[in-house]
Each structure stands twice: as structure tokens, then as C-alpha cells.
Image (cartoon, rainbow, N blue to C red):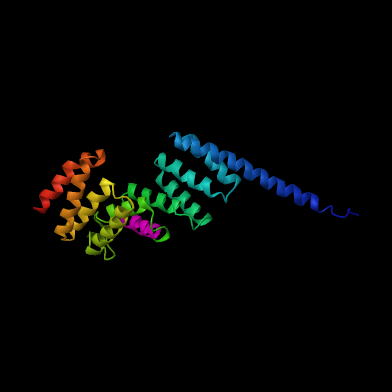
Amino acid sequence: MRRPGAWLVPMLALALAGCGGEDKAAERVARGRALVAEGKFEAAAAELKQATEADKNSFEAWLQLGHAYAGLKKYDEALAAYVTAKKVDRRAVTPYLAHAKVQIMLDRVAPAILELTLVTEMDPKNLEALKLLGKISQQPHQQPDGTTGVTRADLERAELNLEAAAALAPQDAEVQLDLARAQAKLGKRDAALATLRKLQALAATDAAAKALLPEIEQTLKQLN
């Protein structure tokens, strides 16, 4: 006859074993994250792969594994890891943004636009997503009808997101230049000129803006 409460022993053992697995996963994630930061992607991937095996629901393990694979240029594996991270935490924007960056690396502009649009809907003040979406929306990409190019809707999306980025970071020279380019392509010459003049003024005190002066002058030449 079993003693009262004897069934608790195996249950507690299983619970403790689970906690041990999560602790080991957390330790591996910490090591993996540090290795990713150091650019030691091969070692990071090995640690993080084991972390995901120890705890399949570790968001950070899957996210960092994606970063490690991206660093190794194993892009399909990186995308798969980011997709799993999304499933673990659907509210976190980080894996969506990382997924979009890999798509851009692979020159898959249309999927990246969809992904970044989702990020800006989830987090309207995500500066990095706004900047990326504004930039790549101006690049030729496959349209729903199968053609390749840039539509007016693409340029309007670029302008809208770059205006939002400029409001968040008015001193960001790259944002201002990309915004001027979008305005110029939309035929908004006066708006583009105003943005470029603002950028020229910024170049007097800002090193990043000064470095962009040749591109600023080229864009001005195209407008004249």
C-alpha cells in the first residue's frame, strides 16, 4: 500500500528536473548572447542550439540563435529561428525586425516591406523600422501584378515613415536625405528642397550630415 502523498514525490522530481533544464538553458543563453556580441557566431550557435533543446519555449534562446545564424550567413536557419521566436512571443517586435533585416540581406524587398509594416503597426515609434521601411520602399521590388518597380504607393509609404522617423530623430542626417529623395520622386520639389536645405544647415555642425554632402549635392542637382 502506498503511503499518503507518495504520488507527490515523482511529481516534485519532474518539476525540479524541469526547473533544472530551464536554469541550464538560461545559462547557455547568457553565454550565447555574450558570444554573439563578441562576433563568435559558431560558438554562440552551438550554445544557443543546446539552450533551445533544453527549453523550447525560451524566447531569448531562439532570438539569439537567429542572430548567431545570421552572423554565420546561414540565412535560412536564421529566418527559421526568428519565426520560432515570434511564435513564442507574438507581441515582441524584435524577431520581426530581425527577420526583416535578413530578408533585406537576401534582397527580398517585398517580404521585408510586409514585415517592417507589421513592426511599425505593432510599435509606431520604432525608429529603426521606420527608417528601414522608408529606405527600402524606394527600392525596385516585385509588385502584386508580377512586375518589378516602385509605385507611387511605395513612395508615399516611404515618405510617411520617414516623416515619422524625422519627427523622432530630427538630427538624423540619413533620415533627412532619404526623406528628400522620396519627396523628389513624388514630384514634391519644394518640400524636397526644404528638407535638403535643412540637411545642409545640419552639416555645419554634424559630422554624419557633412559626410553626406556629396549625396546631398547630387540630389539637389537632380532637382534643378
At which x and y percent is residue 157?
Answer: 28, 61
Residue drawn 18% across the image and 58% down it: 191
- Which quadrant holds residue 25? top right
Magenta stretch contains residue 117: yes
Residue 75 relative to residue 20: left or right: left
Is 217 contained in the magenta span? no
State whether residue 108 appears in this view.
Answer: no
Instruction: Considering the whole magenta stretch, tell me its main secondary structure.
Output: helix
> Is residue 169 shown left or right of residue 53?
left
Which residue extends farthest bottom? 145
| Nearest to the observer: residue 88 or residue 127 | 127
Look at the image and give the residue range highlighted in magenta.
Answer: 109-120
Give left or right: position of 172 versus 98: left
* Image quadrant in which you'd find residue 20: top right
* Residue at the (26%, 40%) spot, across then down: 208
- Residue lying at 26% horizontally and 47% vertically, measured from the top left: 174
Residue at point 56% right, 49% down? 58
The percent coordinates of residue 9 (x first, y second) are 80, 49
| Quadrant for the N terminus in the image | bottom right
Q: List x then y, in percent, for residue 169.
A: 32, 50
Residue 12 in view in this figure: yes
Q: Position of residue 53 (x, y in %)?
A: 58, 45
Outermost residue on the right side: it is 1
Q: Quadrant of residue 139?
A: bottom left
Residue in the foreground of this view, choosing between 166 and 72? 166
Task: Identify the residue at the far left of this view.
Answer: 224
Q: Is residue 185 above or below residue 38?
A: below
Number of labels in the image equals 0
Q: Is residue 69 above or below residue 103?
A: above
